C-alpha cells in the first residue's frame, strides 16, 4: 500500500527520535567489530592492526588447549541455565500469587518492594551480599546458627558459590520479570474465569484450566527466547562476587576474557575467546527465534 503523501513529514519527529539510539549503537556496537581482526593476529598495540602478524586460527587452537577452558565453559552453561530456569519459574509463580491479592494497596506495595532490586547495580548489591552472607556476622549465618548449623562460606566455597549466584540474581530480577506475566494475565478474558466458576471450578482449577492455558504462549515465548542467553552467565555479578578461591566453580567465559585480555594483556587470545562466545551465542539466538516462530508464532520481521 502506497504511503499517503506527506506522511513522512508527519513522522519526521518520530524518526528523529531514533537518531541518538542509532548513533550510539553504531559507535559502540558496529565500529568495535573491526577488533575481530585481533582474533587472527598476534596483536601488538604499538604496531596496530596493520602491523601485527597474522597467525590464522592459532589463537583459537591455543584457547581450546587452555587447561581450564572446559571447566570455564561448564561453569558458564551451568550458571546460565540455572538462572534461566529460575528466571522463568519464580516470576511466573509470583505473578500468579500477586494476581490473587484483592487489596490494591497491598498488591502495589508488594510489587514495589520486589521491583526495587532490579534498579540497583551489582556494585551496590555485591557489597550488600558480602555483608549479609559474611561468615562472621552475616545475618544469614546468624539465622542458620539459631538451628545449630555451622557458618557457610557462601562466597568462598566452590560447592555453594554457583547457587549463591543463581539465587541472588533471581532475587534481583524476578520482580521486574513478573511484569511480563502480569501483563499476560490481564490479557486473559475474565468471562472464562466466570464461566469456570459457574461450573463449580475453584481457584486451583481455574488456574489449571484457564490461567495456565491462557499464559502458555507467553511462557513458551520467553522460554524459547531465553536460549540465546545460555552463554551469558552475568559478568558484572560474577566479577563483583568471585575470588580466586572459587575460580573452579565460578569462573565463566566473560571473566576469563577479562583476566586474559585486560590483566595479562593477551589481547588476541581474549578476542578469540570473545569471538568464540559470540558465534555460539549468535547460533543459539537464531535457533531460539526459529523455535519462537514455530511454537509461539512470534517473529520480528
Image (cartoon, rainbow, N blue to C red):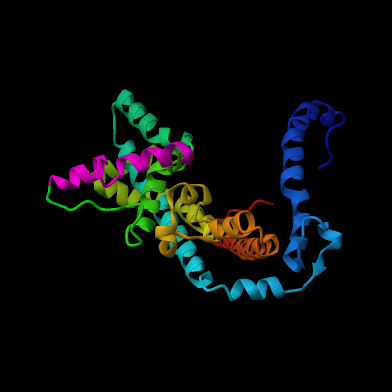
Residue 90 vs residue 117, the one in the foreground: 117
Residue 292 seen from this side: no
Number of numbered callouts drawn: 0
Residue 98 seen from this side: yes
Q: Can you give x and y, in whole percent of width and height, for residue 181 in the image?
A: 43, 43
Q: Can you give x and y, in whole percent of width and height, for residue 64 in the image?
A: 60, 74
What residue lies at 87% left-to-right and 31% top-to-bottom? 5
Residue 33 vs residue 210, the one in the foreground: 33
Location of residue 13 (image quadrant): top right
* Quarter of the picture holding the N terminus: top right
State the extent of the magenta-drawn residues as a range.
122-146
Main SS of the magenta segment? helix
Residue extending furthest top?
Answer: 105
What residue lies at 36% left-to-right and 50% top-to-bottom? 167
User: Does 43 appear above or below 30?
Assistant: below
Residue 181 vs residue 261, the one in the foreground: 261
> Magenta segment: does it hold 123?
yes
Amino acid at each position: 500500500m502506497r504511503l499517503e503523501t506527506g506522511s513522512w513529514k508527519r513522522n519526521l519527529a518520530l524518526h528523529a527520535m531514533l537518531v541518538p539510539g542509532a548513533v550510539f549503537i553504531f559507535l559502540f556496537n558496529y565500529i568495535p567489530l573491526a577488533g575481530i581482526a585481533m582474533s587472527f593476529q598476534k596483536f601488538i598495540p604499538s604496531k596496530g592492526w596493520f602491523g601485527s602478524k597474522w597467525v590464522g586460527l592459532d589463537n583459537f587452537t591455543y584457547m581450546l588447549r587452555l587447561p581450564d577452558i572446559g571447566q570455564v565453559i561448564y561453569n558458564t552453561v551451568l550458571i546460565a541455565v540455572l538462572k534461566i530456569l529460575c528466571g522463568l519459574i519464580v516470576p511466573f509463580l509470583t505473578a500468579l500469587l500477586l494476581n490473587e491479592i484483592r487489596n490494591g494497596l497491598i498488591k502495589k506495595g508488594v510489587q514495589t518492594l520486589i521491583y526495587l532490586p532490579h534498579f540497583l547495580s551489582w556494585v551496590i548489591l555485591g557489597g550488600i551480599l558480602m555483608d549479609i552472607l559474611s561468615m562472621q556476622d552475616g545475618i544469614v549465618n546468624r539465622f542458620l546458627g539459631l538451628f545449630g548449623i555451622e557458618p557457610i562460606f557462601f562466597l568462598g566455597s566452590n560447592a555453594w558459590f554457583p547457587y549463591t549466584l543463581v539465587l541472588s540474581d533471581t532475587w534481583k530480577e524476578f520482580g521486574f520479570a513478573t511484569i511480563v506475566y502480569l501483563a499476560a494475565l490481564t490479557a486473559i478474558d475474565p468471562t472464562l474465569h466466570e464461566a469456570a466458576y459457574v461450573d463449580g471450578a475453584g481457584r486451583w482449577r481455574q488456574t489449571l484450566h484457564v490461567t495456565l492455558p491462557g499464559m502458555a504462549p507467553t511462557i513458551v515465548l520467553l522460554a524459547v527466547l531465553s536460549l540465546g542467553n545460555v552463554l551469558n552467565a552475568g559478568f558484572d555479578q560474577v566479577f563483583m562476587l568471585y575470588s580466586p578461591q572459587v575460580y573452579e566453580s565460578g569462573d565463566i567465559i566473560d571473566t576469563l576474557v577479562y583476566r586474559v585480555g585486560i590483566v595479562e594483556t593477551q589481547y588476541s587470545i581474549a578476542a578469540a575467546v570473545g569471538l568464540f562466545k559470540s558465534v555460539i551465542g549468535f547460533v543459539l539466538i537464531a535457533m531460539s527465534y526459529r523455535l519462537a516462530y514455530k511454537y509461539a508464532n512470534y517473529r520480528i520481521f
